[in-house]
Amino acid sequence: MPVTKATLNDVPELNQLVNTAYRGETSKKGWTTEANLLDGLRIDETTLKGYFDDPNIIILKNTDDAGEITGCVYLEIRKPQLYVGMFSVSPLLQGRGIGRDLLQHAEAYAKQLNCTTLTMTVISIRHELIGWYERCGYKATGEILPFHDDKKFGVPIQPIELVVMEKNI
């Protein structure tokens, strides 16, 4: 299953993957769902298309043997850091190493850019997800951020805070 750079042509498939990984009934088939925490979409095609206009953003995608996108990760250069976001794996394929492979490719990309740290935000009550990132070498920085006010990435059903996590490479 190769990991490659996504293109503008991938936007419709990326949009479907990300939204089904995070929200709705399909997301509940995996262990990374946010369906009980947020309403609305995780992303839309307009926002995704805009990412391809920004030279500091890259989206890596994992594809299966048929060429279908099974996972993706958003990477934004914020030197000396590389921000990791929109990390998504098909709920039906979680637990098969796709996510770990994507993170390893993100780390390799960071090294190519001379970024020394990967950073991300995780919903604070997602203890199982925080634990998974810790097993991958990420550590909480102690910084807590509020969830986005603009509702662009969903509408919280309950109060949500974001934990900042980092991994030095």
Image (cartoon, rainbow, N blue to C red):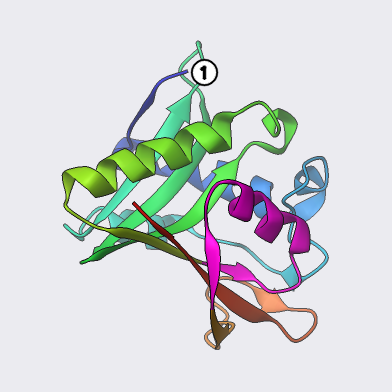
Question: Label 1 is placed on what type of residue?
Answer: Asp
* Disc 1, SS: loop
Q: Which residue is mark 1?
A: 64
Q: Nearer the viewer, residue 94 or 11?
A: 94
The x, y position of residue 155, in whole percent, is: 68, 78
Figure check: 6 above or below 117: above
Q: Residue at x 50, y 12 (%)?
A: 66
Q: Residue at x 69, y 34 (%)?
A: 94
Residues shaded magenta: 121-141
Q: Residue at x 42, y 37 (%)?
A: 104
The x, y position of residue 165, in whole percent, is: 51, 67
The x, y position of residue 31, in whole percent, is: 78, 46
Q: Nearer the viewer, residue 8 or 33?
A: 33
Q: How many marks?
A: 1
- Residue 122 covered by magenta stretch: yes
Residue 28 shown left or right of residue 78 in the figure:
right
Say if residue 19 shows up in the picture. Answer: no
Q: Quadrant of residue 79?
A: bottom left
Figure check: 1 above or below 8: above
Residue 162 shown left or right of residue 120 in the figure:
right
Q: Residue at x 17, y 50 (%)?
A: 113
Figure check: 1 above or below 48: above
- Residue 144 covered by magenta stretch: no
Dot 1 crowding, Cα within 10 Å, few <14, some 14–19, many 20+: few
The x, y position of residue 15, in whole percent, is: 51, 48
Say if residue 107 shows up in the picture. Answer: yes
Q: Nearer the viewer, residue 95 or 27?
A: 95
